Amino acid sequence: AGRDTGTYFHRTGRRSADRLLWLAHASTPQGALTLDDGAVRAVVERRTSLLPAGISAVEGEFSAGDPVELRDPHGTPVARGLVNFDAKEIPQLLGRSTRDLARELGPAYEREVVHRDDLVLLTPRLTP
């Protein structure tokens, strides 16, 4: 009694590879976000999180935590990710900076729409 027993697993800070494989190949997107060209380059080339400023349209009915498809301006899927906002919240965020959103709507809106750790690419890197 009084002794710790068992195995302790340290967190690595990285998302499980299995989880990302599920997101890429087995999840069913509940909606789609259309990105402008700058956001497509940022997500695909620089592997950044998706911010509200880069979104031009939203489709579908989804909740925070659901998988969504990220599309280029022509409708081609480029990535899939877990969204941090409900579909009904996103229209008021379109094209706006997180700083402005936080100032107007509160600190809960100063975050990514899809965090890069919750995002998988469906397309190879773009060519210049």
Image (tube, rainbow, N blue to C red):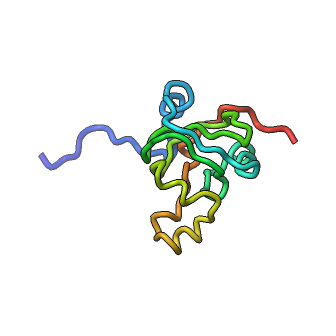
At a point 27% along the width and 38% down the height, the residue shown is 6
x, y percent for residue 97:
62, 65
Q: Is residue 101 above or below residue 45?
A: below
Q: Is residue 28 above or below residue 37?
A: above
Numbered disc total: 0
Q: Is residue 22 left or right of residue 74?
A: left
Q: Nearer the viewer, residue 9 or 118?
A: 118
Q: Nearer the viewer, residue 96 or 11?
A: 96
* Quadrant of the frame with the N terminus: top left
Q: Is residue 77 left or right of residue 10?
A: right
* Quadrant of the frame with the C terminus: top right
x, y percent for residue 78:
68, 36
Q: Is residue 29 above or below residue 111?
A: above
x, y percent for residue 70:
62, 40
Q: Residue furthest top?
A: 26
At a point 34% along the width and 42% down the height, the residue shown is 8
Q: Residue furthest bottom?
A: 103
Q: Residue furthest left?
A: 1
x, y percent for residue 60:
51, 40
Q: Nearer the viewer, residue 58 or 126?
A: 58
At a point 48% along the width and 45% down the height, the residue shown is 12
At a point 51% along the width and 73% down the height, the residue shown is 104
